[in-house]
Amino acid sequence: MRRPQPRNALAMMKGYHSPQLDVEVRLNTNESPFAPPEEFTRAFGEAMAGASWHRYPDRLAKDLRTRIASKHNVEPKQVFVANGSNEIIQTLLLTYGGGGRSAAVFQPTYAMHAQICRVSGTAIASGERSSNFAIDVDEVLRVADHHSPKVFFLCSPNNPTGVADPPEVVAKVLAIAQESGGLLCVDEAYGEFNSSSALGMLDEEVGLAVARTFSKAWAMAAARLGYLIGPSWLVAELYKAALPYHLSTASQIAGLLALDHTEAMQMRVEEVVKERERLQGELAKLDVEVWPSSANFVLFRTNTISGEQVWQQLLDRSVLVRNCASWPRLDGCLRVTVGTPQENDRFLESLSEVLT
Ligand SMILES: *Cc1c(COP(=O)(O)O)cnc(C)c1O
């Protein structure tokens, strides 16, 4: 039989994935090293036992959106919730991207922005970050003039570099996006680990949306839950593109109960930030190049042995980090997620062994 072929854009894709290997120290996907509080897990089990399994979930997730809205001092109609921030990005591109339209990304950055462009038939308007991986406003202007993208993506703090965009830079990019009739989406998947946020720039009259997730700081990657905050007109459009009942009752309950434990989340974030600073300090003593991070991971490049070899030799010691070689301009770079103090020690010991 002649197999039907997928669309050209998909046929050429390798797919985006980090290997899920069985190791003792897993520091490759920026998850939280800590489980959520036990009270959360218990409350979730109880709530699920009483859930109406035979009924569809609340299609508009009103309770969850109301709670998220009050956390950020906005209206529920300014909040869109979905299965991870990846579904947020997908819905945004299904709504504002698609055939004949483009979205701007600034490399190196989170690979899923470009990947979801391809899947949604959105052209990629690709720009470059400057040599220290900061956003270069002139380059944003060039991309805007050349492609008039309908969506501009910033990722702050940026994955996989850890670099955060200062508020004045975000404001400039927003002005450029507005000027060229596009909207700006700031992906703040690591926003809780950073001291600044674009949330303060939100306005009903401005095409700005901020995406956040429960997968990192909230220690709930398994729940697949993320949210977007933006103008209510934008959120209303997203709900036209989203599938009916896309967010399960379990996800909605998980989000609601997680928000009862904001303080525990904040304590975990502080612990991770402390360990991140230690990790950066220790890495700086080794023969590697390290980038300053505002997230829960650190990017580094080894000077003597190839990144590929270091990655493999860490894996031989049951320590898994992310090989960033497939990213543009990150040849030889590795990204390590901040783990527990013990995991970070294991990583640091293994790395110094590999490097000597
Ligand atoms: C991890 C990550 C996400 C989160 O994806 P989820 O679908 O919410 O798990 C989004 N954006 C960036 C930049 C990330 O690194």
Image (cartoon, rainbow, N blue to C red):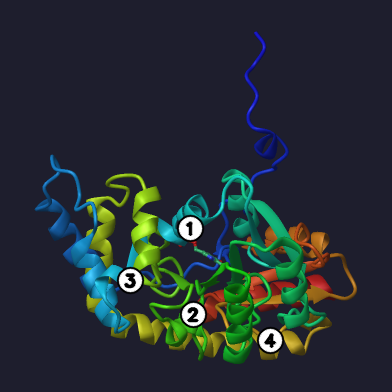
| Ligand 1 contact, mark 1 (Cβ < 8 Å) | no
Instruction: Name the quarter where the C terminus is drawn.
Output: bottom right
| Relative to 350, residue 22 above or below | above
Q: Earlier in the sequence, mark 2 or mark 3?
A: 3
- The label number, if any, that marks residue 191 in the structure image: 2
Image point (55%, 86%), residue name:
275
Cβ–Cβ below 8 Å for labels 1 and 2?
A: no
Whether residue 194 can be seen here: yes
* Mark 3 closeness class: few <14, some 14–19, many ≥20 residues within 10 Å: many
Between marks 4 and 1, how big is the CA–CA gap?
A: 30 Å
Q: Is residue 197 left or right of residue 50?
A: right
What's the residue type where badge 2 is placed?
Answer: Gly
Kindly state the secondary structure of the residue where label 1 is placed.
helix
Q: Position of residue 32 (x, y in %)?
A: 46, 71
Q: Classify residue 296 by image quadrant.
A: bottom right
| Relative to 170, residue 232 above or below | above
Q: Earlier in the sequence, mark 4 or mark 3?
A: 3
Instruction: Name the quarter where the N terminus is drawn.
Output: top right
Q: Earlier in the sequence, mark 4 or mark 1?
A: 1
Residue that carries the numbered disc 3 in the rendered image: 78
